[in-house]
Image: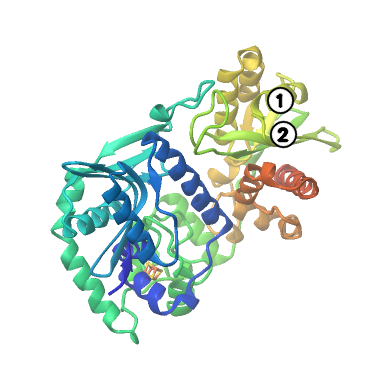
Amino acid sequence: MKLSKSLYTRGIQCSKALWLKKYKKDVLSPPSEAALAVFDTGNEVGELACKLFPKGKEVVYSKDFSSMIDSTKEYIEQGVQNIYEATFMYEGILVLVDILVVKEEGVHIYEVKSSSHIKDMYIHDTSIQTYVLKKLGFNVLSSNLVHINSSYIREEYLDLYKLFTVVNISKEVDDLQKDIPDVLKNFKLYLDDKINEPNIDIGKHCKNPYVCDAKEYCWTNQRKIPEYSIFNLFNLGSKKQIELYSKGIIKIEDIPEDFDMTSNQTQALQNYKTKESYINKEKIQEFLNTLTYPIYHLDFETFQQAIPQWQGISAFMQIPFQYSLHIEQEDGSIEHKEFLAVDGIDPRKELSKKLCKDIPSDVTVLAYNMSFEQSVIKKLAANFPKKSSHLLAINENMKDLMFPFLKKYYVTPEMKGSYSIKYVLPALDKKMQESYKKLEGVQNGSQAMNAYANLSKQAEVDKKRIRKSLLRYCELDTLAMVKILNKLKKI
Ligand code: SF4
C-alpha cells in the first residue's frame, strides 16, 4: 500500500474518499479558486515559518520522492540541524515533515498550518509523521504544530515570534500512535479491492473537517440529493438533517408535519409546501417607518491576509478595500458612489476618509446583514481616531435590510426557508439575480476577495479589467438592495 500523509488524512475523514482518489479520480471535482488560494497561502506561511528555524536546508521537491529521501539522509549525515520538507518513507507511507530539527539525542517535528487554531485533523497529520519516523528508528523528542496567532497585531516590522504560535502536541500525537496500525489495516482492506468502492453513506463527514471533493459524485450522482433539500435549507442543523436522512427523508416537502422544528422553520415549511407567500404588511411598514430619506445603501468588500502586510493589521482580519453606495432619495432618484483602493497599499485610511466624505453622520445607512458592515467600521474607528466619531455615527445610524426577512415578515416559497440575500434576491427580483450571472470575472464575494488579494501580481492591462469587474460586482450588490427595498415598499 502506497500512502502519502495527505492521503492518510483524507482516509481519516472518509475511507471512500481515499479509495476514490486512488482508483476513480475522474469523479472528483477540481479545487475551487478559493481552495487554490488557501493552498497558496499555506505555501507562503510554510516558507515564512522556516525562518523561525534559520540556516536550515530545504529538500527540493521532486516527483521522484526517492531523491528527496536521499537528500534528507545526506543532510542528516552532514549534521544539518534544521531541515525543511524532510522526507521519509516506511512500508509505503511517505511523509514530508515541514520542519525537522535534528539534535544529537533525537529529532523534533514541526508541522506548519496557516490556520489560527488547532484542528483535530492536524493532530492526525502530525501523528502519521511521528509514526513513520519512530518506525524508522528515530527518537522523536517532540511533535509540534506551528500556527498563526490571529491576536497578534503587526507593528512596523513583522515579528515572526509573535505571528506564529508553536504548540507541543506530543501527548495528543502519542495517544494516537496505538491506533495507527489498525487505521492502516483498515485502509489496506478497502484499497486491496480495486473494483468495488467502499459502501460508505453520506453524512456530516462529507463537510467536516473539509468539504470533500467527491461530494458532487456521492451526493448528486449516487444519492440523488436535489439542489434544495433538507441538507441546505431551513437551518435545520446537521443532527436533525441526519435524523431525517436516516428515515429516508431527503425532499423538503417530505418532512413530516410533526417533526420537531422551530416556529420559523415550521412556517417556512408550510409556505414551501403550499407554495403560498406570507407577508406581514403591518410589521414591514413598521420597519419602513424606521428609515428616513435619503437612504444610503452600503456594501463592503473585504479580504484577509494570513501574514499581515501592514501596520495595525492582524492575521485573518477583514480588511475593507472597496465599497458601493447607492443614495436613494424619497422621489426615487438614485445616485451611485463607490471606492476601490489602489492595490499593494493598506486601503483602510483612504477608504475611511472617502466613506466619511460620502456618508454624512446623520443619515440612514442600510446594509444587508449589517453586523458585518458594523464590525468593519468599528475596527476602522479604532484604527483612525480622527475619523472615529464620524465612523461610529454611521454605525449608529445603520439599519438592516435583512431584518424583515430574518423576522419572517416576508416569506415566499422561493426563499426556501432562508433569509440570506442569496435566496431573498432571486425570490423577489429574478432579473436582478440574472445580472450577476452576466458579470465577467467577478460574480461573488469570494471571487472579489481573491481578485483584489492578487491584484498587485497582475499585469497593468489585466489590473484594469479586474478593477472594472470588481466595481461592477459591488455596484450590483447595493443596487440589489435598492430593488429589495422597493419590493418591500410596494407590498
Ligand atoms: S462525499 Fe462523503 S461519502 Fe463521499 S467520499 Fe466524500 S466524505 Fe466520503
Q: Is residue 6 visible?
A: yes
Q: Quadrant of the N terminus?
A: bottom left
Q: Quadrant of residue 381?
A: top right
For the point 16% across and 42% down, which residue is it? Answer: 105
Q: Residue furthest front?
A: 78
Residue 348 position in % (x across, y down): 64, 27
Sequence-wise, the earlier of marks 1 and 2 is 2
For the residue marked with disc 2, what is the amino acid? Ala
The percent coordinates of residue 36 (x first, y second) are 54, 55
* Residue at image point 38% right, 63% down: 67
Q: Secondary structure at mark 2?
A: loop
Tag 1: residue type? Glu
Q: Could you classify mark 2 by the number of other residues whose Cα lies within 10 Å: few (under 14), some (14-19), or many (20 or more)?
A: some
Pointers 1 and 2 in contact (C-beta within 8 Å): yes
Nearest the eye: 454 or 401: 454
Scheme of colours in the image: rainbow
State which quadrant residue 52 falls in. top left
Which residue is identified by label 2? 341
At which x and y percent is residue 179? 16, 60
Residue on which disc 1 sits: 350
Q: Which residue reaches farthest bottom?
A: 195
Seen from the viewer's position, the closer of residues 107 and 287 is 107
Give the alpha-carbon distance from disc 1 to disc 2, as whole Å.
Answer: 7 Å
Give the answer, above or below, for where 299 lies relative to 348.
below
